[in-house]
Image (spheres, coloured by chain):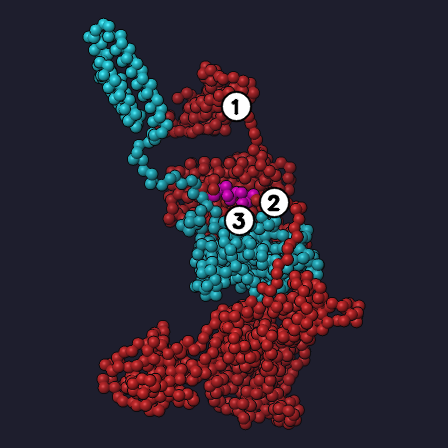
Amino acid sequence: MKLSLNWISDYIDLPGDLELSKLAYDLTMSTVEVEGVHFLKDMFEGMVVGVVREIQKHPDADKLVVCMVDVGDEGDAGGGLKQIVCGGTNLSEGMKVAVAKPGSKVRWHGEGELVELKKTKVRGIESYGMICSSSEIGLFDLFPFEDEATIMDISEFDAAAGTPLAEALDLDDVILEIDNKSLTNRPDLWGHYGIAREISAIYDLPLKELSGAVPTKTDAVETGGQVPCSGEADFKIIIDDTERCPRYVGVNIDGLFVKPSPFWLQSRIWRVGMRPINAIVDVTNYVMLATGQPTHAFDSDIIKENIVVRRASDGEKLLLLNGAEMILTPEDLVIADGEGAVALAGVMGGAKDSILTATDKIILEIANFDALSVRRTTIRHEIRTESSTRFEKSIDPQRVDLAHALAMQLFAELYPDMLVTGFHDNYPKPLKGNTVEVSVDWLEKRLGKRIANEDLTSILKRLGFDVDFEKGGLSSNLTAGLMRVTVPSWRSTGDISIPDDIIEEVARIHGFENFEARPIETTFEGIINQPMIDIDRKIREYLAFRCGMNEVFTYPWVSEEYVNAVMPGNEGLLEISAPPSAEERFLRCSLLPGLCKATSDNLRYFTEFAIFESAQVFFDRDYSVLNDSREKLPLQRRNVAGAFVGGQEDAELLFRKAKGALESMSRFVHMEPFTFEQKEKPHWADDVVWLNIFTGGQGGQGAQGSQRMQSETENLSPCFKLGSVALLAKRVSLDCGIKNAAVVLFDIDIDSLKPFASRTNEFAHIPEYPMTDYDVSLIFDSSVKWEKIFEVATAKMGADSMLRAVSFVDEYKGKQIPDGKKSVTLRLAIGSLSKTLTSEEIENCANAIIKRLVKTLGAEAR
Amino acid sequence: MKERLDAILQDGQEKIKAAMTIAGLGDVKSGLLGKQGALSDILKEIPKLEVSLRGEVGRAANEIKSKFTEMIDARREEISIKASEISSDFDLTVPGIEPSGGALHPITQMCYDLNDAFRSMGFEIFEESDITSELYAFDNLNFPPDHPARESMDTYWIAGSEEKRGGERLCLRPHLTGASVRYLQTHKPPYRFVYPGRAYRNEATDAKHERAFFQYEALIVDRDFTFSSGKIMIKSVLSKVFGRDVPVRMRVGFFPFVEPGFEIDMGCLVCNGSGCSVCKRVGWIEIMPGGTPHPNVLKAAGLDPMEFTGFYVNIGLDRLTMMRYGIDDVRLFRSADLRFLRQFK
């Protein structure tokens, strides 16, 4: 919303030394956000009033003339006369024009960017700046023209040659730009008067009355300054739906005619962003911009019989002022006459009743409409106006009086011969002002500061509240130290109703920055210990910092294409009712489709990478009560999933990387370790390379102890058990647009993990006697699993053996190894706790193990 | 003869000292002690000497020989301790080997920085599910029944529940504040916790708007707490996160679930408050709403609003992270684009 500082100054005398930046800051801190401060005169920098003294034809151009224009530069040679070439068709000698001097900025033909003028020659003739058309200096709305070559004629303005244009047109104003968002809860601030009231409160300055003459209800009773009402116009106002229209004032005014409004009025409306139309319409807009109360003028010749405020009938049609044809519903409120709807209440007038050139009498509507009804209508029909924007904020019906008075004053001023021929004020449900009682001690406690009663009174009175301090037990509920605050009507429509609202009023006017912080008490109980929260961070940090993976975020709604590719189907998925797009209506029950999409996207730029995401997944089942029995929420689980991506030839390596990341995770994260087993192949997995992940150290048996946790995790199909790690099946890869790359994915249900209460590394003494690593390479049948080799190798490991550990070194197939065979290298850690072994003893130990492997598993030495 | 021996000794000592590398010392050694060496020559000449001199010269030559051996060994040790064994054209400008190249998402990094700051002040971390109900997202928070945010154009309602009401009307949470009430309901006062999480709003996306975004809520509920303390809390946290003093101001703002409510601005870190394009020339950047929890919110949590008060802020993590790095398009955060994410180690 734009505000004119000159306009505000009608209602309040701003101190001369008040800097604009301070005003903007203080308003921002205490009331509304001032987004910008614009000096209107900057638009007219370097522009002055010129008087055309002489006009001659341009020697080389038919459509141009050469003018001698007095621009008031008296010191100059030539007595202030400047030669300017001009293409205007309406120029005459003695005409006052706007001259843009060199250095000023204009918009050629009112289009494009601002251009700085330079002294130049036009067709060989020197020209000092230009004589402007209104569109070239942004004033088209105030000086409209039909012919492009019309020069802006300002002869009627009382200003000498050389007067700066802004001064001559009285456009030396400051425009404050207010962020509308910061006004949403303050219906009282949608006009200049409301803002003036705030400034008066902030600076403790008197606020002037916005007074005017109000017509009296009865016939021709003339009392102090009232406009007499003849009562001859015969119409009634019938409000069918008083919920949606709590008040309707209709004034029948005769003796009007359509003419432009005076320049000052046009200019005020224009500078805050509205276009002047004609005096009748301009008055209604002016009233709205001053008071925040929208008004509407109907041509009363068009209105048949009475004014009826009613719900539209289903399918009722209404052609609006802007030419749009509405098809209404019973949820829309309309203003109707005997024949049908004439206006969409609080939103826009109809084409039929609008002010036309022949209009000579009107019915002025000053009404109050229900905020929700207006908003629903604007949403339903996608139409928003200055009027609806204000009604949506919940305007108080009391304000009708203020607007009414101002409107009558303006009409009387613009049309001295006007007559009020009818007046009805239908106000079936008068607004009840709120009263709030606040304990002064409580206020002090909440503010952290005592504010004297007189100061509280002063602050609140400036805002229009009435304040009363109870002196003692008048009633059992009221004790000394209680402040009774009566809320003004304009703050009583939802804005102020409880003591906490009063805190804000006092604090913001006193100045939020004028309160000091008080020390806070603290305790040392209840140290923060949140292992289930910390586990997610530990996992992310582990994957990022230890496993070299990049964390990604994807959306919870998954493109159907990826759901179909990765998941067995879309059953059991939750859907969004109005999704970002039709393909993105499903909410994820697994992070994998999103990761596949991220993989596919990144493969355009990278060939090898590893990514992971930690986020929630959702299921349309197992609804349960969380805190409140009225609420049932679906199953939602925290998951973490990752993808290791590389060349197709690296599939096995990638799988081992992923498995390694998972195997070590429990140690780094300090939780119960994982075990791996093939139990149920995930839909998306390769036929061979897949494992399910279990926790609790008893592969496939689930966690010990917690029955609840186990049954929950078992529900998590297709994320079997904790999750899975597998190579992405070729078919799924292709469906996801992944070509020429191997992807190994894993996913884990974080909520099923069991963090240890503390770190659990175990300490063992450093061996006193040497330990020898002894590598053995043996050839096995390809079908022999490492698990088995390990089992056999460690079968007799124990206190009486010299073997301390067995580990995997590598596996090799290829040259020198017969088909169907593989070479496995294992490392034996051999040593004694009581002596240094001889090399013979070491050999013996190793040989015993090799022998066992040969005998049990058919191994051959290489 | 003696002169020759002295000269050999002299010369040998100098050469040994002069040797700077193990290889060089090897050359010196073979020069001095080898078969072609000066000392060998002398030894070879001994038989030709007078018998009476032979013993003496032999002894002297052997003394020198053992002296050389000793010196060479000493020098070898000296060299091998001092000198590099690496060729001198080793290219020191070749980049080192990068450790594993992973990283957390920049928003996660911001979130953890805030977590650390708040935890250091005794705040718990709270997490809740993304899907909630109208009861928690709006009703408990003092949103009037007709509030525009309840419309489907603003909130992602779950299909099949959109026509229901309250606890049965489900949505992707439009903000975190609703679940803060869950925390209050399930814990005991006084409360001090932060609540990071995803929130969702149905709106058109562009460089500044996202449908899915990260919020970070901090809430204190206690018997005696004023908004001025809240301001100091915000200032401390932001100053820690940004590593410098950050000016903070709280100005009037309206949010249904707080009273009084604030818009909280931080001084623009780009221009230090003097005004630039980032802060729209005002020197301040709006970063979060805040305020005292509305009495109706406290009531929803089962607390007496005359006894309890508090302070609440809700930080837009996307925005704060954008400011931290000068990121100009919010959509990058959910692009999963490694060209973007790999910049934030």
Element marked by disc 3: helix
Image coordinates for residue A602, horizontal then vertical, percent? 40, 48
Q: Which mark is residue A204?
A: none
Mark 2 and mark 3 residues within 8 Å of each other at the beta carbon: no
Q: Amino acid at mark 1?
A: Pro
* Residue picked out by circle 1: A767
Q: Residue at x 58, y 59 (%)?
A: B231
Mark 2 and mark 1 residues within 8 Å of each other at the beta carbon: no
State how far apart marks 2 and 3 are (Cα): 15 Å
Which chain identifier belongs to the cyan chain? B
Image coordinates for residue B158, horizontal then vertical, percent? 56, 57
Q: Residue at x 48, y 38 (%)?
A: A661
Magenta span dominant secondary structure: helix
Residue range corresponding to the magenta coloring: A535-544
Q: Residues within 10 Å of mark 3 (few under 14, many from 20)?
A: some
**Mark closer to the observer (2, 1):** 1
Q: Amino acid at mark 3?
A: Tyr
Of all residues, the one furthest to the left in this rendering is B48
* Residue picked out by circle 3: B112
Camera-side residue: B79 or A409? Answer: B79
Q: Of the residues under marks 2 and 1, which one precedes in the sequence?
A: 2
Q: Colour of chain A?
A: red
State how far apart marks 2 and 1 are (Cα): 38 Å
Image coordinates for residue B172, horizontal then vertical, percent? 56, 56
* Residue picked out by circle 2: A530
- Residue A586 seen in the figure: no
- Residue B335 seen in the figure: yes
